Image: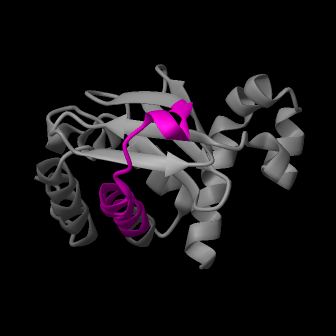
Amino acid sequence: MELIDNYSRAILKLFADDLSHKLRRSADEIRNNGLTAYDFSAGQRVEIRFEDGSSACFKHAFFISCPEKRLIAVFTEHCGYYLFPSLGTKVSQAPETFLETSQSMTSKKARQVVQVIERAIEVFENEGKALLWLNSPNLALGDVRPFDLLATREGVKKVLDVLVRIEHGILA
């Protein structure tokens, strides 16, 4: 559970300035106190469609798309915060009644991303270093950021393979 709490804090820290603009609260307040129930609109859903055709749907949520970070952050009131690569990913927000439910894909895709982040933190033994690595172009991945590959099963496998090589000191 501590790992998930650290992951959520890292996402808040990474998006504090963007959240500040959206929620009209100071970035420091968001970093220190996190989000509250008042930050969420009842009945809002976020739907993400990945380039491989799968999708994820989050209730009581909002998103922030950050092109310069090439990330989409989804903030849910009850189920935590998630990061997705923006490359090849489409995201929309609408009242719950207008979106199809795809909760099984939500859980699966979110678990994959969380597993990769947990593995990176384990390999680098530091949350900040892991997030920096996930967010930086990587020569072993064709000069693509690991986060940008997490939208597909094949991409997740490639990122995990590189993490195994790093862990064992195999750089080539």
**Left or right: 16, with 119 as reference point:** right
User: Quadrant location of residue 41?
Assistant: top right
What coloring was used for the rendering? one colour
**Residue 84 seen in this snapshot:** yes
Q: Is residue 16 left or right of residue 104?
A: right
Percent x, y of residue 75: 61, 46
> What x and y, as percent, mark residue 99?
42, 37
Residue that lies at the very extreme toward the bottom in this rendered image:
1
Q: Residue at x 77, y 22 (%)?
A: 21
Tell me residue 130's x, y (percent).
Answer: 45, 56
Residue at image coords 49%, 49%:
58
- Is residue 36 visible in the rendered structure shown here? no
Image spot of residue 146 (x, y percent): 29, 44
Specify the farthest residue to the front: 97
**Residue at screen point 63% across, 48% down:** 60
Is 117 magenta? The answer is yes
Write down the quadrant of residue 162 in the picture. bottom left
The residue at 68%/27% (across/down) is: 18
Q: Give whichever of 98, 154 is nearer the camera.
A: 98
- Please state the extent of the stretch shown in magenta in the rendering: 94-119
Side of 167 where 111 appears, left or right = right
Q: Is residue 160 left or right of residue 128?
A: left
147 in the magenta segment: no
The majority secondary structure of the magenta stretch comes to: helix
